Amino acid sequence: MSTQNKYPEIYAFIDSQNLNLGTSKDIYNAIGQRIYTGWKLDFSKFRVYLKNKFRVSRAFLFLGYMYEHKKLYSILKSQGYNIIFKPTVKDPNGKAKGNVDAELVLHSAAIEFPNYDKAVVVSGDGDFYCLYDYLERKGKLKSIIIPNDKSESTLLKRFGIYKTFVNFDKSMLKL
């Protein structure tokens, strides 16, 4: 617990791609029926949500850097996000790729680890299983915030007590 503060220091580590796609994309089942209707997340409201619901003092947003989105990055910083960029590369189809998983794990498990008491990780991606396990063993896992209840990895089953679904609070978070 922070010496200056009677409350634990809580940091959020946000996989922006997983959060954005997890809330905005429609999801269909195997027979083509839509089981989830995407919506537009208001990142300003989401930052307030993290502060009010989870007592998050610092929110690290992991993004692939694209020059044409410089204005957006300034807006996100003004809303209280600490932005961690990953250089992007183009795939064979010309689409920018900036997988931020390694950066998120590095910051939460090493770089920022001594600075917080509890972590909130925003992603429904099973690639973070080892991070969730590590944070839980160290007594630092507070919550796993998953964009929607229709697309979480089955690897996250064992972390049920930590899970919160963004889509359940859609009415207060949509743009």
Image: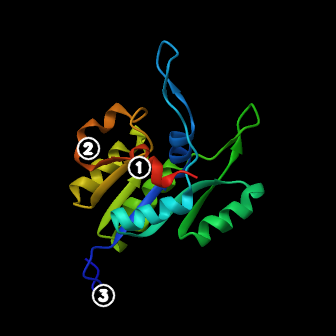
Compared to 114, does 37 lie above or below? above
For the view shown, which residue lies furthest in the front direction? 171
Check the image and report above or below for 109 versus 167: below
Front-lying residue, 8 or 108: 8
Q: Earlier in the sequence, mark 1 or mark 2?
A: 2
* Image point (78%, 55%), residue name: 68
Foreground: disc 1 or disc 2: 1
Q: Tell us which disc is closer to us: 3 or 1.
A: 1
Outermost residue, top direction?
A: 31
Q: Which residue in the protein does label 2 denote? A: 159
SS class, disc 1:
helix
Q: In this view, does 93 lie to the left or right of 34?
A: right
The amino acid type, in three-letter code, at marker 2 is: Phe
Q: Mark 3 points at which residue?
A: 4
Dot label at residue 169: 1
Real-space Cα separation, disc 3 to disc 1, in angstroms: 32 Å
Residue drawn at 58 percent across, 46 percent down: 40
Q: In which quadrant of the rendered image does the N terminus lie?
A: bottom left
Q: Which amino acid does label 1 sit on?
A: Asp
Tell me if 111 is positioned left or right of 81 in this view.
left
Q: Which amino acid does label 3 sit on?
A: Gln
* Marks 1/2: CA–CA distance: 20 Å
**Image disc number at residue 65:** none
